[in-house]
Image (cartoon, rainbow, N blue to C red):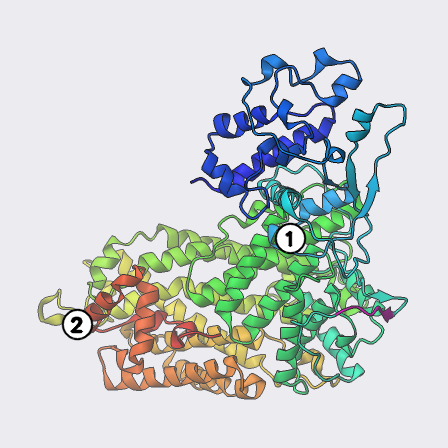
């Protein structure tokens, strides 16, 4: 049986065809001929499509048009009432030659007053535009209450024309204050309304909509606030009670912290509209007084900035998060669909910051699909300044979500799901995007005015390589039961060299205020300094992930292998100078050295810019001037595995750039950097993960000291090792037991080097 969606779409098309021009009404036989013959549907398909509508046993003509003369439906000489009243029989589009042969149908008994009545929702132009933007998942969003209006028919018309009067429901276009109650649509009218919303969403996703978005589609409106006082409304029972209030001065600091540390990196709002909306909320420190869309956004803003404050309790932040989450998923959502997207993006950030990358990845994927359903990729034109501002804000929101999805994909160890992020163009700079406009400082006299859009574009271009890096990691992965030398000789290095060249081009094309290797006139600006350090840390981590597979190959080539007589290693300290050594060995050696240097630099960068949590004092602007501590989790663990692998490479023993003393100091700092995280959020998932990362690295270090062959399997328990194998083997789940048995037997023949590419997500069953 076919899907019911095409049938309902065809029903909707047939109904709307007759209603659009109001000139003619197709007969039952014509409709059934279209559905059952031309469209290829069976009677069973039609019956299944009408299940639950109350029309399962009705004739198709009665369902669509409620005709009072069913015995005449399909008759070759019947014309529509409109054409008959205008004496236009010859111009009726449903002429006898167009009709299929008549069929006898059992007559239905209907009251006379119901003759030729059609009850359909008549939408205003603004409501049509809003429905074109709505996603099908937002069908439960509150709708304005319709006002019933009867179209008057002049008394000069005969009784038959009066019986053909039409009841019409008009919907007010004013959506600023939607009522708490809504009418309930039943029968075929409800199905037509749902199909209409679905068709608009499909058109938006496929780019077939021609209308431009409303000017205020991103407006941070506060519909529950009137003259500075929140309007009372019925609260949903699914929303938890608000937690205790925070002092007003702390609330102001939290909002300022969000703007200076999160908004400048993820500009998903219009700054002036955000500040204006905050001013409309009179009782800012008690968020329970309102439940509009902006209140949910404000709760998430407090959650994100509260993670950096010592005075804010974890339980309070978690309670705020659950309350905002309930409001976002509530059918009583008071806000635009785009406000919902912005709130969902903030929730993704919070989940990632609290040690839940899998949940964050699932939610950001849903958020991106929601944006696609709203038709963002088709909204590319702007006729005036306001529309251009809205267009640029939509582009920022899209690319911020894509960047976050790719960051999470790196954390989880999977390829990103959005393969073409440039289906929405990169944002361009506006006059309101300067950093000094956010911080409120005077523009510099040096002639350089940094912009938050430049940082966003740089991150978008940087994380545009994640898909290629994920494919490279899979191609260059060393299997535990294979020879590393054979793997290296068969490996195609062209993708690696291409990504390496593109990263070099990315680095030299950065604006001067974002380059850490050049002195900048604005280096003392706290926001500029943080953005430089964050971008440098992310760049080093991307480089490390690119080089790490060749480091693992270098370690495998430097250990015992059964392919050569006496188990002689394929690569030694003196062998690269030999004429017989292939050039790929030199590439592996140089890449391994660079990978160790990158790990040392990344640890030193985090060490220099890691401070205590904020306390609201005057020194807060200069504290925590590096990447957020929740991002450092993956950075530090990857550096730890690289430092351990560097111990096993013979060509790194006497290297002057990354000497043994530097590696030892780096290892000591790395372990110390895990300790402050106990004080940050030590009672949550992130604290547990940090403790597990440190203990795993220490266990690996002890295992490598006991086993000179480089086998670190003793440093990983069986569950961690099995999860790592499941993630890296890329095989169906039903083959896991066979792979695990193969892994266990292979460990007796060759050393296990999978720990080099392990991730923090491999250390726990589920970080949820």
Is residue 232 part of the magenta span, yes or no?
A: yes
In this rendered view, identify the residue nearer to me: 30 or 16. Answer: 30
In this rendered view, identify the residue nearer to me: 369 or 241. Answer: 241
Q: Does any portion of residue 511 appear in the rendered image?
A: no
Mark 1, Cα crowd under 10 Å, few <14 / some 14-19 / many 20+, is some
Mark 2, Cα crowd under 10 Å, few <14 / some 14-19 / many 20+, is few
Q: Earlier in the sequence, mark 1 or mark 2?
A: 1
Residue 705 disc label? none
Residue drawn at (64%, 54%), measured in percent from left and top? 138
Disc 2 target residue: 745
Disc 1 target residue: 139
**Range of magenta residues:** 229-234
Residue drawn at (42%, 51%), measured in percent from left and top? 498
Question: Which image quarter is the N terminus in?
Answer: top left
Answer with left or right where residue 386 lies relative to residue 191. right
59 to 606, vertically: above or below: above
């Amino acid at each position: 049986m076919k899907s019911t969606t095409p049938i309902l779409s065809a029903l909707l098309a047939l109904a709307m065809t007759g209603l659009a021009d109001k000139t003619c009404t197709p007969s039952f036989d014509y409709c059934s001929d279209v559905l059952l013959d031309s469209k290829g549907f069976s009677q069973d398909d039609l019956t299944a499509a009408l299940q639950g509508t109350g029309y399962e046993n009705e004739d198709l003509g009665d369902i669509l048009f409620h005709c009072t003369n069913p015995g005449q439906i399909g008759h070759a000489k019947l014309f529509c009432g409109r054409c008959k009243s205008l004496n236009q029989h010859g111009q009726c589009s449903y002429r006898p030659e167009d009709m299929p042969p008549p069929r006898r149908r059992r007559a239905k008994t209907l009251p006379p007053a119901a003759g030729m009545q059609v009850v359909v929702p008549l939408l205003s132009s603004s409501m049509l535009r809003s429905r074109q933007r709505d996603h099908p998942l937002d069908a439960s969003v509150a709708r304005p209450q319709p006002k019933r209006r009867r179209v008057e028919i002049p008394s000069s018309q005969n009784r038959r024309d009066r019986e053909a009067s039409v009841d019409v429901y008009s919907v007010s276009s004013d959506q600023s204050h939607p009522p708490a109650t809504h009418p309930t649509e039943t029968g075929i009218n409800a199905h037509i309304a749902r199909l209409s919303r679905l068709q608009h969403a499909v058109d938006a996703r496929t780019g077939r909509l021609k209308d431009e978005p409303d000017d205020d589609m991103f407006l941070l409106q506060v519909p529950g606030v009137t003259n500075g006082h929140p309007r009372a409304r019925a609260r949903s029972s699914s929303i938890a009670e608000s937690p205790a209030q925070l002092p007003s001065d702390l609330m102001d600091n939290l909002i300022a912290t969000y703007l200076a540390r999160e908004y400048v990196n993820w500009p998903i709002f219009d700054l002036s509209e955000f500040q204006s909306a905050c001013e409309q909320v009179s009782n800012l420190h008690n968020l329970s007084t309102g439940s509009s869309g902006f209140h949910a956004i404000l709760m998430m803003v407090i959650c994100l900035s509260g993670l950096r404050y010592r005075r804010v309790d974890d339980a309070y932040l978690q309670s705020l998060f659950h309350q905002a989450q309930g409001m976002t998923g509530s059918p009583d959502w008071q806000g635009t669909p785009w406000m919902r997207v912005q709130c969902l993006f903030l929730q993704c950030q919070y989940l990632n910051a609290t040690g839940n990358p899998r949940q964050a990845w699932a939610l950001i994927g849903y958020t991106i699909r929601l944006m696609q359903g709203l038709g963002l990729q088709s909204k590319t034109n702007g006729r005036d300044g306001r529309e251009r501002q809205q267009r640029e804000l939509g582009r920022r929101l899209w690319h911020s979500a894509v960047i976050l999805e790719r960051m999470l994909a790196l954390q989880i160890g999977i390829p990103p799901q959005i393969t073409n992020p440039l289906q929405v163009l990169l944002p361009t700079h506006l006059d309101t995007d300067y950093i000094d406009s956010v911080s409120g400082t005077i523009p510099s006299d040096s002639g350089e005015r940094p912009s938050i859009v430049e940082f966003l574009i740089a991150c978008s271009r940087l994380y545009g390589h994640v898909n290629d890096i994920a494919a490279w990691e899979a191609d260059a992965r060393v299997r535990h039961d294979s020879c590393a030398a054979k793997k290296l000789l068969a490996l195609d290095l062209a993708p690696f060299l291409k990504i390496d060249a593109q990263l070099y081009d990315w680095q030299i094309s950065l604006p001067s205020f974002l380059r850490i290797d050049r002195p900048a006139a604005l280096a003392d600006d706290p926001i500029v300094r943080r953005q430089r350090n964050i971008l440098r840390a992310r760049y080093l981590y991307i480089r490390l992930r690119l080089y790490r597979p060749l480091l693992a190959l270098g370690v495998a080539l430097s250990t015992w292998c059964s392919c050569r007589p006496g188990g002689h290693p394929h690569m030694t300290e003196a062998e690269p100078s030999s004429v017989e050594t292939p050039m790929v060995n030199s590439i592996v050696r140089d890449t391994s050295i660079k990978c160790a240097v990158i790990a040392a630099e990344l640890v030193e960068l985090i060490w220099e810019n890691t401070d205590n949590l904020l306390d609201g004092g005057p020194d807060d602007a200069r504290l925590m001037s590096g990447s957020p501590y929740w991002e450092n989790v993956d950075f530090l663990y990857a550096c730890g595995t690289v430092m351990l692998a560097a111990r096993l490479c013979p060509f790194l023993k006497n290297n002057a750039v990354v000497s043994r003393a530097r590696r030892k100091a780096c290892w000591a700092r790395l372990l110390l950097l895990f300790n402050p995280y106990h004080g940050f959020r030590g009672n949550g998932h992130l604290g547990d993960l940090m403790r597990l990362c440190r203990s795993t690295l220490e266990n690996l270090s002890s295992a490598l000291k006991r086993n000179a062959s480089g086998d670190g399997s003793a440093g990983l328990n069986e569950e961690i090792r099995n999860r790592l194998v499941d993630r890296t083997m890329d095989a169906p789940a039903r083959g896991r037991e066979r792979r695990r048995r193969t892994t266990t037997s292979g460990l007796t023949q060759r050393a296990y080097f999978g720990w080099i590419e392990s991730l923090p997500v491999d250390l726990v069953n589920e970080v949820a």
